[in-house]
């Protein structure tokens, strides 16, 4: 499995469609900041503007998707100076699994846009979220994942129709597919020669190394063993990893193991000593010290407070 898929899986990434709106000029929607949700918007028809806190206003046209990983407060509209309605006020509770279309604004030109919400365990998705820009723009025009989602949203119930079984679950999976597709497109669009986690995914050798580390973190890896798997010598892999990722290979592996240990502390009742061993530490004391440096809390306190 590739490193991006592993990050999304282990971080319990989930997505859903929040609003399917058709807005006529003039209109504006305000969205408050959130430490829980990340937001994204896909413009299906027409165009609109987006401005997030501290970020220059951007124009979105049909096919454009914008993702705000940090959950910043922002405005979306045809004219950001008009009185804004809150996103919460236009969200409609699904009826029998069906998302009800929303209409707002005046009598001018129409824009259809779809709002998505995303959640994940942020301490496990940090490598990804920290590497993304505050606003990630992607051209999704003609994407098959978008067409599948639009097809699912176009299904409407008549009075005689039975509810579409699994409609909500299907819509959530399609929302996730659109997001993963957008991420992959964004990563592949990055210019060569960059550094960091996203550049590592784009690199033939580092991408394979990251997939091995993320997919089999508890394995007794050495630089030489990883090199044999990806087709580089020990020294060549060590040098290339440092150049692309900006840190030594084993520093990265240690950090990822600690992230997995943090999730294990929350999700299981396994003894801390056993989790420490899986993370590559010979003693619980050494593990506790390293864990505290990374998460600012010893493992026992992390487990207790986060569960509460």
Image (cartoon, rainbow, N blue to C red):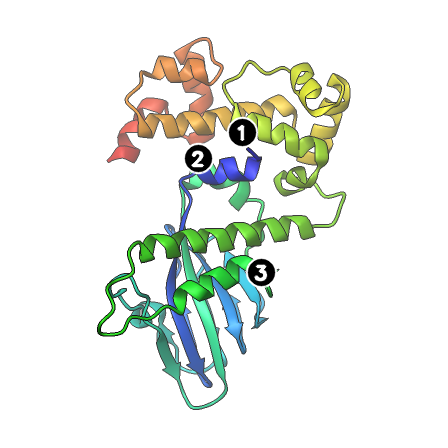
Of badges 3 and 2, nearer the viewer stands 3
As drawn, 41 above or below 198: below
Q: Residue furthest front?
A: 160
- Residue 52 versus residue 101 in the image, above or below: above
Q: Secondary structure at mark 2?
A: helix
Quarter of the image where the C terminus is located: top left
Give the residue displayed 67% in from the left and 49% down from the top: 188
x and y, in percent, of residue 79 in the image: 49, 81
C-alpha gap between disc 3 and disc 1: 28 Å
Q: Which residue is mark 2?
A: 10
Few, some or many residues within 10 Å of mark 3 (<14, 14–19, 20+)? few
Q: Which circle, 3 or 1, is nearer the viewer?
A: 3
Q: Where is residue 286 drawn, in percent x and y?
A: 45, 13
Residue shown at the point (34%, 17%) measured from the top left? 272
| Residue 121, image x, y percentages | 40, 40
User: Tag 1, which secondary structure?
Assistant: helix
Q: Earlier in the sequence, mark 2 or mark 1?
A: 2
Locate residue 278: give its quadrant. Answer: top left
Q: Depth check: 150 or 188 in front?
A: 150
Real-space CA distance between mark 3 and mark 2, rounded to the nearest whole angstrom? 26 Å
Looking at this rendering, what residue extends furthest in the top direction? 282
Q: Nearer the viewer, residue 194 or 110?
A: 110
Which class describes the residues within 10 Å of circle 2: few (<14), some (14-19), or many (20+)?
Answer: some
Residue 266: mark: none
- Whether tag 2 and tag 1 are in contact, CB under 8 A, the answer is yes
Name the foreground residue: 308 vs 108.
108
**Mark number, residue 214:** 1
Q: Which residue is mark 3?
A: 143
Residue 302 in sight: no
Q: How many marks can you see? A: 3
Labels 3 and 2: the sequence-earlier one: 2
Residue 189 in sight from this viewpoint: yes
């Amino acid at each position: 499995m590739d490193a991006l898929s592993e990050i999304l899986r282990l971080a319990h990434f989930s997505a859903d469609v929040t609003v399917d709106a058709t807005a006529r000029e003039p209109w504006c929607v305000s969205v408050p900041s959130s430490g829980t949700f990340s937001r994204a918007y896909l413009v299906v028809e027409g165009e609109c503007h987006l401005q997030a806190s501290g970020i220059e206003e951007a124009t979105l046209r049909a096919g454009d998707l914008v993702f705000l990983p940090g959950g910043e407060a922002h405005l979306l509209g045809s004219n950001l100076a008009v009185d804004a309605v809150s996103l919460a006020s236009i969200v409609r509770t699904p009826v029998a699994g069906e998302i009800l279309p929303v209409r707002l604004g005046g009598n001018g030109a129409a824009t259809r846009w779809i709002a998505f919400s995303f959640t994940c365990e942020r301490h496990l998705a940090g490598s990804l979220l920290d590497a993304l820009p505050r606003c990630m723009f992607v051209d999704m025009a003609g994407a098959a994942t978008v067409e599948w989602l639009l097809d699912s949203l176009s299904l409407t119930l008549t009075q005689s129709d039975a509810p579409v079984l699994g409609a909500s679950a299907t819509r959530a999976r399609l929302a996730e597919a659109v997001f993963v597709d957008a991420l992959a497109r964004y990563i592949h669009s990055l210019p060569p020669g960059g550094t960091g986690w996203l550049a590592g995914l784009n690199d033939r050798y580092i991408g394979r190394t990251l997939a091995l580390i993320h997919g089999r973190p508890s394995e007794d890896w050495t630089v030489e063993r990883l090199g044999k798997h990806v087709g580089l010598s020990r020294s060549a892999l060590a040098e290339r990893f440092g150049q692309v990722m900006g840190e030594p290979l084993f520093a990265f592996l240690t950090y990822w193991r600690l992230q997995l240990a943090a999730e294990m502390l929350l999700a299981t009742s396994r003894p801390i000593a056993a989790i420490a061993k899986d993370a590559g530490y010979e003693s619980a004391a050494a593990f506790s010290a390293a864990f505290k440096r990374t998460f600012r809390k010893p493992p026992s306190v992390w487990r207790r407070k986060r569960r509460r």
